[in-house]
Image (cartoon, rainbow, N blue to C red):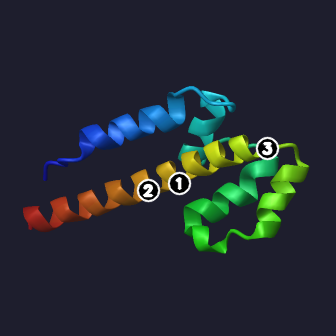
Amino acid sequence: MHDRYAALWTELRRRVLEGPATTSPTLRQQLAARQDVPAPLREYVDKLHDGAFAVTDDDVETLRRAGFDDDALFELTASAAVGAASLRCARALALLDEVEDA
């Protein structure tokens, strides 16, 4: 199956994970991939990847106390969300390919 949105996904990922921001591209890419996530962010990123509904005000406040300002929190949240969405989309497209091939 051809993913007609592939170019849009690629551009979204590029802008969120590599574009100008207050946080480093390396950190944003780590959160998106859920790899080598620094300790202060690990629980938050896990919640975003597993089910963002589980994130609470206390989670955000904990990160603020750890030194992350609102801009950083937005960038890091968007990065983890884009990573989680990309993984889900890839899984869904793979399943559709399997169905089409069957």
Circle 2 Cα neighbour tier, 10 Å, few/some/many (<14 / 14–19 / ≥20) = some
Q: Amino acid at mark 3?
A: Asp
Instruction: Name the spot of residue 99 as percent of width and height, x first.
Output: 14, 68
Task: Give the residue furthest to the bottom.
Answer: 54
Task: Give the residue furthest to the top.
Answer: 20
Instruction: Name the spot of residue 34 as percent of width and height, x first.
Output: 59, 48
**What residue is disc 1 on?**
81
Left or right of 45 on screen, residue 85: left
Eye-nearest disc, 3 or 2: 3
Instruction: Name the spot of residue 38 as percent of width and height, x first.
Output: 76, 43
Left or right of 1 on screen, residue 55: right
* Front residue of 98 and 52: 52
The quadrant holding residue 88 is bottom left
Q: Amino acid at mark 1?
A: Ala
Q: Residue at x 66, y 28 (%)?
A: 24
Tell me whether the residue at label 2 lies in contact with that at label 1, contact meaning CB atoms closer than 8 angstroms: yes
Instruction: Name the spot of residue 55 as percent of width and height, x first.
Output: 69, 68
Left or right of 70 on screen, residue 33: left
